[in-house]
Image: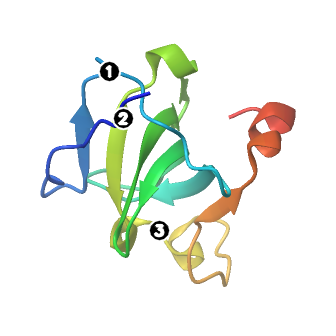
Amino acid sequence: MSKKTATSVASRGTSNVSRDTTADVSKTLPVARFYYQGSHSHPVRRTVLVIETTNNIIRGYEMREGATIRSFKDALVKSYRKDMIAAGEELRQKSKEKTTLKRLPLFDLIENGV
């Protein structure tokens, strides 16, 4: 499979890439679940199948965006800035967690869904 590189991250924190080709999914903890602030008034729940991770960016197939759930074939490749991932204190349930980012094995996505 060929790798697809994303465009630069937009000022709002995400960027889209067309799905001409399929990129390889990360082998270690490929599922990322988090609440993302972005340009919304409140953090929105995301589930991403990770393609690539750097110090400040997570790139992958967006399987869930809020209440919108996509199949793998319909998922867009998006990039997310890690500094825009919500902390637990920014959510309504007021968790003391430093970040809402959770990296999980692929089995978790299959067992629990997006």
What residue is shown at x 82% (from left), y 41% (from top)?
A: 107
User: Going 36% across and 30% down the picture, which residue do you hit?
Assistant: 2
Q: Quadrant of the N terminus?
A: top left
Q: Nearer the viewer, residue 83 or 77?
A: 77
Q: Position of residue 44 (x, y in %)?
A: 47, 49
Q: Looking at the image, tell me whether mark 1 or mark 2 is earlier in sequence order.
A: 1
Query: What separation in Å lies between label 1 and label 2 (alpha carbons)?
Result: 7 Å
Name the amino acid type tagged 1. Arg
Q: CA distance from mark 1 to mark 3?
A: 27 Å
Residue 21 in the image: state x and y as whole percent. Answer: 34, 21
Amino acid carrying label 2: it is Val
Secondary structure category for the residue under label 3: loop
Residue tagged 3: 86
The residue where tag 2 is placed is: 77
Q: Residue at x 41, y 56 (%)?
A: 42
Q: Secondary structure at mark 2?
A: strand
User: Which is closer to the viewer, label 1 or label 3?
Assistant: 1
Left or right for 111, reference 32: right
Going by the numbered disc 3, the residue's amino acid type is Ala
Compare residues 43 and 23 and report the one nearer the observer.
23
Horizontal and vertical percent position of residue 15: 22, 44
Residue 19 — which label? 1
CB atoms of marks 3 and 2 within 8 Å: no
Q: Is residue 82 above or below residue 66?
A: below
Q: Are marks 1 and 2 in contact (CB under 8 Å)?
A: yes
Q: Is residue 20 above or below residue 88?
A: above
Q: Quadrant of residue 54?
A: bottom left
Query: Residue, x 25% and y 32% (percent of image)?
Result: 17
Quarter occupied by the C terminus: top right
